[in-house]
Amino acid sequence: MNLAELERKLLAVARAAPPGDRVPYAFEKRIMARLGARPVADVSGFWARALWRAAVSCLAVVLLLSAWSVLAPARNNPDFSQQFESTVLAAVDQEGAN
Amino acid sequence: MERTDAELIAAVLQGDTASFEPLVQRHSPRVFATIRRYARRESEVEDIAQEIWLKAFQKLKGFRGDAPFEHWLMRLALHTCYDFLRSHRRNRETSFSELSDPEDDWLERFVSAPSPAAEDAAAARQLVERLLEHLSPPARLIITLLEIEERSVKEIAKLTGWSVPLVKVRAFRARAEMRKVLAKVAKEKYL
């Protein structure tokens, strides 16, 4: 069998018969329906909304803490450093007492 | 008056999604003809076409307008078809002993008289499709663009995004692969 001739002939057949360009009925309507159904990915919008929400939450926390620090009644308790020190050294104190 | 592609694209980019419909209507015949070169089943053809148009809508912002929209769309279509070929390589291992009767007859007629024009063009077309299905995805793409659509190497490089030397190397390999497949047909049928 002459393979080169077979190849030439088959390619000529393929060239002579271009595929059809028929479009299925209402194809464009289906595409538009798919586009309408799928949410458009708006990455920058998503980040802008998320950052604004985060900023509002942070501002609320800051305001609450500020109000609390200003308005909270002063206590007579020893300060945090003293409490921390006595907790850490509690075991040593106990040993000394024994 | 009918709006141009550029006007429709500008409208879509400004949020008027409905302006995308005339674009789909206008360019779908070319998209479908391109896909049918690479996929045989109509269900697959339609799925690929849908994928191409959805991608086109998503990537429309990337269309710069320095070349016609059709060229941009065809590049997108070709890339999608290539992805399809790479993910559907199911027919490559089938044997040529399963040729249909008309395909078999066409080959018999060719062997007995290679020079006269073959009468049954449909059988020959089926045979070509079967041969192309046995090629690797890059070989099939190159043979289709270079030998069947008769495009230049430069055009193929633009369409595929491959460099000109790469297209030439792949064309050389594709022709060798094609000859190998044809030799397999000859061996299975006549030895």
Image (tube, rainbow, N blue to C red):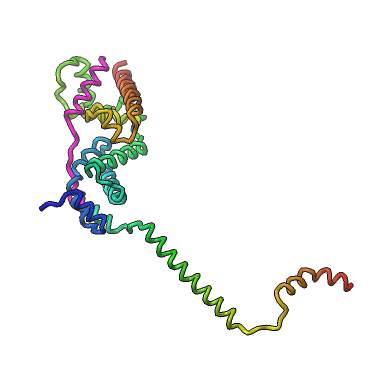
Q: Quadrant of the C terminus of chain B?
A: top left
Residue A63 is left or right of residue B90, and the answer is right
Estimate the x, y position of residue A96 in percent, counting from the top left: 88, 71
Q: Residue A8: say if magenta.
A: yes
Q: Quadrant of residue B147?
A: top left
Please tell me which residue is depicted at 21% across the width and 21% down the height of the picture.
A9
Residue B58 is left or right of residue B11, and the answer is right
Q: Vertically, is B99 above or below A61? A: above
Estimate the x, y position of residue B3 in percent, counting from the top left: 15, 52
Nearest to the observer: residue B34 or residue B159: B159
Q: Vertically, is B8 above or below B143? A: below
Residue at far right of view? A98
Residue at far left of view? B1
Residue B130 seen anywhere in this rendered image of the structure = no
Nearest to the observer: residue B2 or residue B48: B2
Estimate the x, y position of residue B46 in percent, counting from the top left: 25, 45
- In this rendering, the count of numbered labels is 0
Residue A49 seen anywhere in this rendered image of the structure = yes
Please tell me which residue is depicted at 23% across the width and 17% down the height of the picture.
A5
Q: Residue B176: say if magenta.
A: no
Q: Quadrant of residue A97?
A: bottom right
Q: Quadrant of residue B68?
A: top left
**Which span is picked out in magenta?**
A1-29
Residue at far front of view? A70
Residue at far bottom of view? A73
Estimate the x, y position of residue B85 in percent, counting from the top left: 33, 36
